[in-house]
Amino acid sequence: MSHKLRVGELRALYLTEEEIWRTFTIVLTTKSKKSATYKFGLLKAMIENLYQVDEEAEVTYDQLAYSFTKIYWNLVIHHELEQGTRGSAVVNQLNDIYHSYNIPQEMPFDKLDTTIQLAATRRIKAVMKTNVFGALYGDTQGAFYAFDHKTEQFKYNGAVLTFMRKYQRLLIDLVNHHMAKMIEQLNEGPHIQYLLNKVESIAKRSTLKPFEKVLLHYFEDNCFYCGKSLHKTNMQTHVDHFIPWSFVQSDHIWNLVITCSACNTSKNDKLAVRSYLDEVVDRNERMINQPELVQQESELATYKKEKMIHLYDYSIQNGYEDIWVPR
């Protein structure tokens, strides 16, 4: 009954890649008992927070719960997809908020008012304590992470953290595939069309406008890549994920830059030439020295330049070898 645990300690400090792959295989396949998709949801939340850890490889329950809530709001409410046993706690809590606030069904999570997002996250965090953290912990035999309900801290095994970064793109594809496969078995009807695409896109923010306003206000008057002025009336500004979103799977201001439309369209899902890595690292150093901005963007509190460098190097290891240079 591992899902009942309130504290889970790391049972293995060192794991080989073969041992980690073997455990992932068990979790992703039918060898792991699943009455709902929540183990997949936690894995997706873990992947989304790989670069939000502190120096002790820890993240808070709030960080994971926010990602987890976003995933399930978009699946359960926005796409109307069953996730497991009817009456499950996550589905009940989200439906209660959906009806209580009279929210339009077509509204994705990032469009919700911040107070509603936080209310939903608090409720789902409580459910995760009961049904999610311990369940995946049991399937991984306590080797992947430690957790503590009292301190609400979640600690990655260092070997697993490195492994997940190294094989991030492959793991995203595997988790999305198996999650979509299970959802397909739990649902029927026309709304399951393009199911894999729905699962792949559930973590993606539909608008980056709030970030655009912040970046333009504090830093960037010109296109980050080509240097063209963005003040011209006919110049359309875009927000680009410096490390492609398809790899990062999350939106963090330290990975976002302002570009002109031509550069953003040309770069698309590619990695910019390494010389721009130094520039974004320098920009981020200036960013974290803005106290008002750090208070406004909470993820800056755990930002270190090493994260940006590691993220760039791991993205190349994950197949982003088509390096883009501005025209």
Image (cartoon, rainbow, N blue to C red):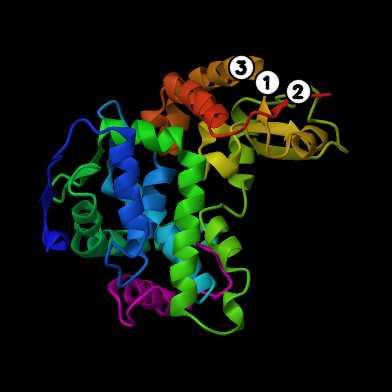
Between label 3 and label 1, give the one nearer the viewer. Answer: 1
The span picked out in magenta is: 81-109
The percent coordinates of residue 186 (x first, y second) are 43, 78
Give the tally of numbered discs: 3
Quarter-of-image position of residue 133? bottom left
Decide: marks 2, 1 in contact (CB < 8 A)? yes
Judge the density around disc 2: few (<14), some (14-19), many (≥20) Cα neighbours within 10 Å. Answer: some
Q: CA distance from mark 3 to mark 1?
A: 11 Å
Judge the density around disc 1: few (<14), some (14-19), many (≥20) Cα neighbours within 10 Å. Answer: few
Q: Which residue is mark 3?
A: 279
The percent coordinates of residue 108 (x first, y second) are 54, 64
Q: Is residue 110 visible?
A: yes
- Identify the residue shown where x is 63% and y is 39%: 213
The percent coordinates of residue 71 (x first, y second) are 45, 60
Looking at the image, tell me whether mark 3 or mark 2 is earlier in sequence order. Answer: 3
Report the amino acid beneath label 2.
Val
- The residue nearer to you, when weighing 269 against 27, is 27
Q: Which residue is mark 2?
A: 325
Q: Is residue 250 visible?
A: no
